[in-house]
Amino acid sequence: MSSSRRHFLAGLGAVAAAAAVPGSAARALAGPALLYPPADLSYFDLPLHHGAADIRIGYAPIPWKGKNRQAIEEISALGYPGIQLLANVLDDYPDPHALKDTLGKHNLAFVALSSGTAPIDPALASKTLETHAAHAHYLHEAGGDYLQIVGPSSKGTTFTASDYRREGKLLTEIGKRAADYGVRTGFHNRMGTMGQTPEQVDAILDAADPRYVKLELDIAHYLRGGGDPPAAIRKYDKRLLFLHLKDVERADTRNGYRFVELGQGRVDFVAIFDALRSIHFRGWSVVELDGEKTGASRTPTESAELSKQYLIHELGVRV
C-alpha cells in the first residue's frame, strides 16, 4: 500500500471516529487538522435551473356538449396538440385502446381525464375510490397523463377543519391508486366547490400528501375565488401539475360572471405566462371555456380558434 493511500485511509478513519464521539473529545480524536476542511454546502439549498419553460397548449371540449368525436376532429384540425376529456368519453369509447388509436390518428396527446368529484361523506368513500381507480386504469390504457379531481359542492355547506383533512386524505388515497397505473392526480380548484378560495385550496393541499396530489390550477376560477393566479403559480411551483387557461368577465348573471374566450375578459395572461416562465414550467396548459359565450354568436370551433389566435399573436405562445 502506498504512503499516500495509507494517509488517505487514516484520515477517513479519524473523521469517522470523530463523528461518533461528541464535543471536545471528538475534536481531540480528530487531531489538529482534518483531511479536508469543512465545505460550504449551502448552495445545494438553492433550486436547480431545470431548463427553459416548455408550455404545451391543449384544449378541452366542453363547448361541444358531449359530442366527443366531433370535438376530437375539430380540435385536431385547429392544430391544438393536446386534449382533456370528460369522463363521458368512456361511453363513446368503452375500449380505451380505441380512444388511444383515435387520438393518435388526430395527433392529439391525451393530457387529462376529468374524473369527477371527491365527496367527503365517509359512506361514499369506497365507491369514490373504486370509480377514480377505474378511471385511472382507463386513462393509462388510453395513453393519458393526468387525472383531474374536483372537491365536493359547497352549496349550503360550511366546511370545518376536519372536513379539509378528510378531503386531503381521500385525495391522497385516490392519488395512490392512480399512481399504481403511472397516472398523476391533480386537484382542480373550482367555484362552487370546497376548493373555491385560495385558503380552501391551501387547506386541502396541506392535508394531502404532495407525493400523490398535485395542483391543477384553473386561473379564472382562482381569480374569481379571490386569488392572484400568477402568485399561485409561483407559490405552488413544483407542485403545479398542469393548468386551465381560462378567461372570465363580469356579467349580469346569477353568479355575477361568465367565462369567455382568452383575451376577452379580466385575466392578465401576460402576468400568467411571465410567472410560468419564472418557474421554468414544463408541461401542459389546457384552454377551457365553460360554456359558449352568451348570445351563442360563435361555434365551439370559432371560440377555440379565437383563443388560439390570441395566444399566438398577442402573447407569442406557440400552439
Image: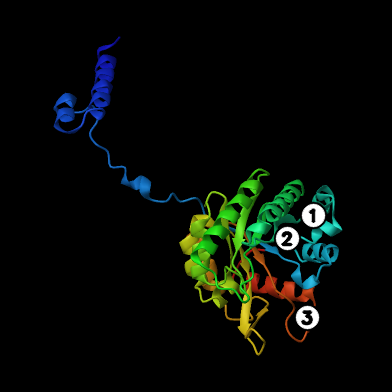
| Residue 238 located left or right of residue 218 | left
Element marked by disc 1: helix
Contact, mark 1 vs mark 2 (Cβ under 8 Å): yes
Please report the residue visible at 61 percent of the width from the left and 50 percent of the height from the top: 173
Q: Amino acid at mark 1?
A: Leu
Q: Give 184 or 266, whichever is nearer the viewer.
A: 184
Element marked by disc 2: strand
Q: Give 216 or 200, whichever is nearer the viewer.
A: 200
Distance CA(mark 1)–CA(mark 2): 9 Å
The numbered mark, 1 or 2, whose residue comes first in the sequence reads 2
Distance CA(mark 3)–CA(mark 1): 25 Å
Q: Amino acid at mark 2?
A: Ile
Residue 195: x, y in percent? 57, 68
The quadrant the C terminus occupies is bottom right
Element marked by disc 3: loop
What label does residue 103 carry, if any? 1
- Residue hosting label 2: 83
| Residue 272 located left or right of residue 78 | left
> Is 133 located above or below residue 155 in the figure?
above
**Residue 169: quadrant of the picture:** bottom right
What label does residue 223 carry, if any? none
Q: Amino acid at mark 3?
A: Arg
The numbered mark, 3 or 2, whose residue comes first in the sequence reads 2
- Residue hosting label 3: 298
The residue positioned farthest toward the bottom in the image shown: 252
Q: Residues within 10 Å of mark 1 (few under 14, many from 20)?
A: many
